[in-house]
Image: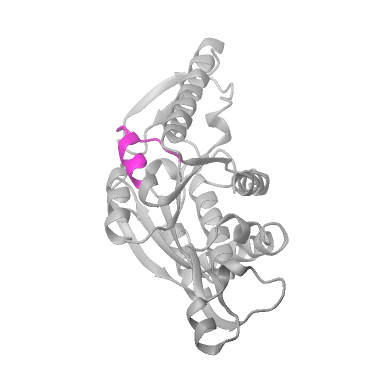
Amino acid sequence: MKPIGNRQSAIGNPSATSHRELLKKVRRIEIKTRHAVNDVFAGRYHSTFKGRGMEFDEVREYFPGDDIRSIDWNVTARTGVPHIKKFVEEREMTVMLMVDISGSNDFGSTPQLKRDLAAEVAAMLAFSATRNNDRIGLILFSDQVEKYIPPHKGPRHILRIIREVLTHKPESSGTDAVPALDFLNHTQSRKAVTFLISDFIFPTDCARPLKITARRHDLIAVAINDTHERAWPQAGLIEWRDPENGQTVVVDTSSAAVRRELLLSQQYRSENLQRTLHRAGIDFIQLFAGEAYDRAFIKFFRQRGSRR
């Protein structure tokens, strides 16, 4: 639910957001996220997400200090000179971004909407992936798959991903991650590093689909939240509208008891989500619109690196 009076996104409304303004917004995100990738996340992404394994590179003569377990005995016997097999890391991976664009993500109590933060995070991950020569794909979803961009490389491809996250107008305002998870599993036959970017306000239990997907792919949950979802303001009577079903309700935020119940409800939802993800073996990153996200990702990279 969100206050009717809160700032609404003008995305999809040509009279409110001109093509030039959109390009400026995309450019700002590009500059900001490129800076984060170059100055903050340099090397962390590469060390966290290894390639699929090792691939054969060449056979060369043995030199003192080489690992004797790498000796190619067939070539050694044929030439009479010790040779070893040399392998290199198979670096290229497929990275999939699954971004929730349902109605609840067009909410923001700060100048940054949750959907804006999702676009920024998607851009940062896309630039990190392309810097490491990985392919990047996109799935936009509501309670259905709204848009699919197959994995590809290149700066123009990344800019297209940013534009789609910012501007795509969903056909449905509801939320359900199950169709998107099923779509991912059917379209990506090989294991992919997958970031599920959402506020995770789902009406149905996604525990089993999440667990199935986590077995097939390296699934990471990125929760996009708003600060008012963890600290409710004392603003008197507020009429709230659910952006996904249109229902409205009047909430008395001047009541300490009401604010406490709202906070406890939010805490319960967050804790339940984290338990579900933990049981499925899914890493969890929690972000808030209007706040820096670099520390959260650095912590995530560090934890993943220590587990290796």
Residue at the limit of the structure toward the bottom, as seen here: 79
Q: How many marks?
A: 0
Which quadrant of the rendered structure holds the N terminus? top left
Q: Position of residue 117 (x, y in %)?
A: 54, 50
Q: Is residue 242 visible?
A: yes
Q: Position of residue 99 (x, y in %)?
A: 42, 52
Q: Establish if 73 lies above or below 78.
A: above
Q: Is residue 175 visible?
A: no
Residue 175 falls left or right of residue 166 = left
Which residue occupies the foreground of this view, 288 or 273? 273
Residue 21 found in image quarter: bottom right
Q: Residue at x 51, y 55 (%)?
A: 119
Residue 209 is covered by the magenta coloring: yes
Which residue occupies the foreground of this view, 290 or 222? 222
Q: Position of residue 148 (x, y in %)?
A: 33, 62
Q: Establish if 68 lies above or below 216.
A: below
Q: Residue at x 56, y 72 (%)?
A: 88
Residue 90 falls left or right of residue 146 = right
Magenta segment boundaries in residue numbering:
199-213
Q: Residue at x 44, y 26 (%)?
A: 272
Residue at the limit of the structure toward the top, as seen here: 257
Which residue occupies the foreground of this view, 104 or 249? 104
Scheme of image coloration: one colour
Q: Position of residue 242 (x, y in %)?
A: 37, 33
Q: Residue at x 51, y 23 (%)?
A: 267
